[in-house]
Amino acid sequence: MMKGAFAMLSEKVSALLNEQVNKEFYSAYLYLDFSNYFEARGLDGFANWYKIQAQEERDHAMLFYQYLHNNSAKVTLGAIAQPDKVLDSDMTVLKAGLEHELYVTGLINTIYAAAYEEKDFRTMQFLDWFVKEQGEEEDNANDLISKMELFGSDPKSLYMLNSELAGRVYSAPSLVL
Ligand code: FEO
């Protein structure tokens, strides 16, 4: 369990945070698979967008990892599952992204609820950033689906959308621990 005189994470909260390290690395791996799909399709802009998404997910994983260490909690690194979504069309990929983000929002909410129950205000404050981030992640995923619905069936418009997504650049998370 915990070490250090100032340790304050409960076993339950710390186990959930530890699981989240793994889930965020899985998210990175999943989005890399999406990027992989679009590379093979020749849609390099979409591939770029998901590659950057994968980078952001690695950042999320590291934030959970660092938060645990900053609070003297033990971290156990488990196996990262193989991406298991069936990617058989562009829209399937985009929808799998939204579905995944909704799932992650649920995970964050579960940890938040556990922290709330235990009056673990420090963890709640840490998670606030993720609550906001999940709102943005869901928005982005929804936005991609809407654009694809509007423009995906026209090759010229798809080309333009691909070019727009090629412009996404990585930026480090605003949360620093
Ligand atoms: Fe780490 Fe896409 O949520």
Image: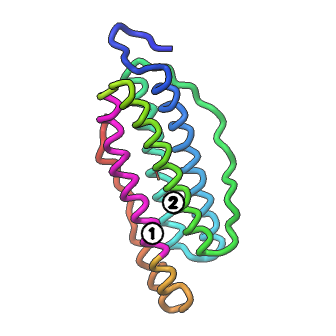
Which residue is pictured at 60% across the width and 75% down the height?
90
> Taking 3 as reference, is 58 above or below it?
below
Which residue is pictured at 41% across the width and 18% down the height?
72
Compute the Cα span from label 2 to label 1: 18 Å
Secondary structure of the residue carrying numbered label 1: helix
Q: Is residue 29 left or right of residue 105?
A: right
Q: Is residue 123 magenta?
A: yes
Give the image location of residue 106, x and y in percent: 49, 47
Quadrant in which the C terminus appears: top left
Q: Are marks 2 and 1 in contact (CB under 8 Å)?
A: no
Secondary structure of the residue carrying numbered label 2: helix
Q: Is residue 71 left or right of residue 150?
A: left
Which residue is pictured at 37% across the width and 45% down the height?
130
> Taking 103 as reference, is 6 above or below it?
above
Q: Quadrant of residue 39?
A: bottom right
Give the image location of residue 1, x and y in percent: 51, 14
> Taking 94 as reference, is 176 above or below it?
above
Give the image location of residue 166, x and y in percent: 44, 72
- Main SS of the magenta part reads helix
Give the image location of residue 4, x and y in percent: 38, 9
Read off the magenta span: 122-145
Between discs 2 and 1, the one toward the N terminus: 2
Looking at this view, name the residue that lies furthest to the top.
5
Residue 142: assigned label: 1
- The amino acid at mark 2 is Lys
Residue 51: assigned label: 2
Ligand 1 under 8 Å from disc 1 Cβ? no
Residue 40: assigned label: none
Nearer-the-camera pick, 19 or 36? 19
Nearer-the-camera pick, 177 or 13? 13
